[in-house]
Image: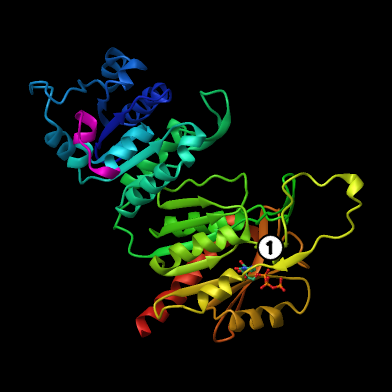
């Protein structure tokens, strides 16, 4: 690190507060000056003595404490910081920040700061998925606040699910990378779909496919690394996102994916549909498990909405649509047809005949075809590298298109 940086860490009252101690340590060890603001609830989990010893600075937790030489007010603190992170961020602090409530030292400071602000949510999965928490996170992200997605795993409430605070190392890496690279606020926003969809037959069975979601997730990371804000709409997958510019929405069915995409598409400049959306869904979903003695021999299916085709019908002049084509025969010809019938600017073709390409493998080999009919062959390599190359090419075509208009 060339210059010494100042990081302000906010700690709120969740069990993950103990992990904030490792975060203080990681920043301090890497040469950062660290100051900490903790809520009264946070101090039920960690002690002022530990925080002050690890950060080598006074703890700030009382709005009404008299300023002393080492104890400055909240405005001066936020001016001092190069970035602010709240880890763990409980549903309470997220709600307060989204509603403009300032009733303690930390919430007051968060409203006063204009510095890059990162939140690392930590809570029970049901709380994390609650519509009000999700709406607050979305609102805060729309206003330029970076959300460091929680992990899935074992939670303090003895259940497993999404809500466990990201590991201190991951939080440190995101903020350190952010501060050590030059950042302009994102001007381009992308919508990316990823993964399979599951179309329920009964409570235990579904119509689905082998997509792992890796291609779509890699594209989301590659776009975010280019400073692009990403709305990632993902079908069921085990994958995690890493970059703070990625906002993830989880869906199960094609209908849910269509609904979320329809809500978000108008605000996006680049739309990439990498999801393997089921083309058919059961006409009826049985409420009870279908038993063997039912002698079921077939399931009636109906077509799903073609999300890409439907959304591209209302394509705006400045929007850039990218589709995927997964083919087993007449590959280039079929891809060309899809490029035109779905009103796309670019199509990424996967041929299942190519070894190491397609579903559920870490590698891919693709062809890119643009509207002029130009075809680019990208040889076999990891999906992360393929994603970086697709994004590089796509941004060249996108910028050319938008210079003309
Ligand atoms: N797609 C979509 N909604 C669907 C089906 C597909 O948005 N219901 C999108 C995919 O995300 C992909 C593109 O359309 O970007 C092409 O998907 P693909 O499965 O290759 O083609 P289909 O249009 O489904 O046609 P077919 O399965 O007959 O090849």
User: In the rendering, at what x and y percent does residue 386 appear?
Assistant: 58, 61
Residue at disc 1, CB closer than 8 Å to ligand 1? yes
Query: Residue drawn at (44%, 52%), measured in percent from left and top?
Result: 246
Query: Residue drawn at (81%, 47%), measured in percent from left and top?
Result: 290
**Circle 1 sits on which residue?**
278
Left/right of residue 320 with respect to residue 293 in the rendered view: left
Q: What element carries label 1?
A: loop
Q: In this view, does 269 lie above or below 91?
A: below
Q: What are the residue bounds of the magenta stretch?
A: 98-108
- Mark 1, other Cα within 10 Å: few <14 / some 14–19 / many ≥20: many
Query: Residue drawn at (55%, 81%), measured in percent from left and top?
Result: 343
Q: Is residue 43 above or below residue 201?
A: above
User: In the rendering, at what x and y percent does residue 231 appear?
Assistant: 45, 57
- Quadrant for the N terminus, please: top left
User: In the rendering, at what x and y percent does residue 365 appear?
Assistant: 67, 65
Q: Is residue 351 above or below residue 82?
A: below
Which quarter of the rendered image does ligand 1 occupy? bottom right
Left/right of residue 101 with respect to residue 285 in the rendered view: left
In magenta stretch: residue 103: yes
User: In the rendering, at what x and y percent does residue 33 appear?
Assistant: 24, 30
């Amino acid at each position: 690190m060339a210059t010494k940086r100042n990081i302000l860490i906010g700690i709120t009252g969740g069990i993950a507060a103990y992990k904030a101690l490792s975060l203080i340590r990681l920043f301090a060890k890497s040469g950062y000056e660290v100051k900490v603001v903790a809520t009264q609830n946070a101090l039920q989990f960690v002690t002022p003595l530990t925080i002050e010893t690890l950060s080598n600075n006074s703890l700030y937790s009382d709005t009404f404490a008299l300023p002393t030489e080492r104890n400055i007010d909240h405005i001066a603190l936020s001016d001092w910081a190069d970035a602010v992170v709240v880890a763990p961020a409980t549903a309470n602090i997220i709600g307060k920040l989204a509603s403009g409530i300032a009733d303690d030292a930390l919430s007051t400071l968060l409203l006063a700061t204009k510095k890059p602000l990162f939140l690392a949510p930590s809570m029970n999965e049901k709380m994390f998925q609650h519509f009000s928490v999700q709406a607050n996170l979305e609102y805060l992200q729309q206003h330029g606040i970076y959300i460091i997605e929680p992990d899935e795993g074992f939670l303090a409430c003895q259940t497993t699910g999404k809500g466990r605070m990201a590991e201190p190392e991951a939080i440190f890496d995101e903020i350190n990378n952010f501060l050590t690279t030059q950042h302009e606020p994102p001007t381009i926003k992308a919508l990316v779909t990823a993964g399979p969809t599951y179309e329920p037959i009964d409570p235990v069975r579904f119509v689905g496919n082998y997509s792992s979601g890796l291609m779509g997730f890699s594209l989301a990371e590659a776009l975010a690394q280019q400073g692009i804000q990403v709305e990632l709409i993902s079908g069921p997958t085990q994958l995690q996102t890493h970059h703070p510019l990625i906002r993830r929405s989880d869906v199960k069915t094609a209908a849910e994916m269509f609904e979320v995409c329809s809500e978000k598409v108008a605000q996006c400049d680049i739309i990439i549909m990498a999801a393997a959306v089921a083309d058919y869904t059961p006409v009826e979903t049985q409420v009870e498990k279908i038993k063997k003695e039912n002698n079921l021999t077939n399931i009636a299916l109906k077509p799903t909405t073609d999300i890409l085709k439907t959304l591209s019908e209302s394509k705006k002049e400045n929007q850039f649509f990218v589709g995927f084509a997964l083919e087993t025969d007449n590959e280039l010809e079929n891809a060309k047809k899809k490029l035109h019938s779905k009103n796309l600017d670019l199509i990424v073709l996967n041929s299942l005949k190519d070894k190491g390409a397609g579903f559920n493998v870490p590698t891919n080999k693709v062809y890119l075809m643009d509207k002029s009919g130009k075809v680019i062959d990208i040889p076999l390599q990891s999906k992360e590298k393929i994603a970086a190359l697709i994004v590089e090419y796509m941004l060249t075509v996108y910028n050319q298109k938008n210079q003309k208009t």
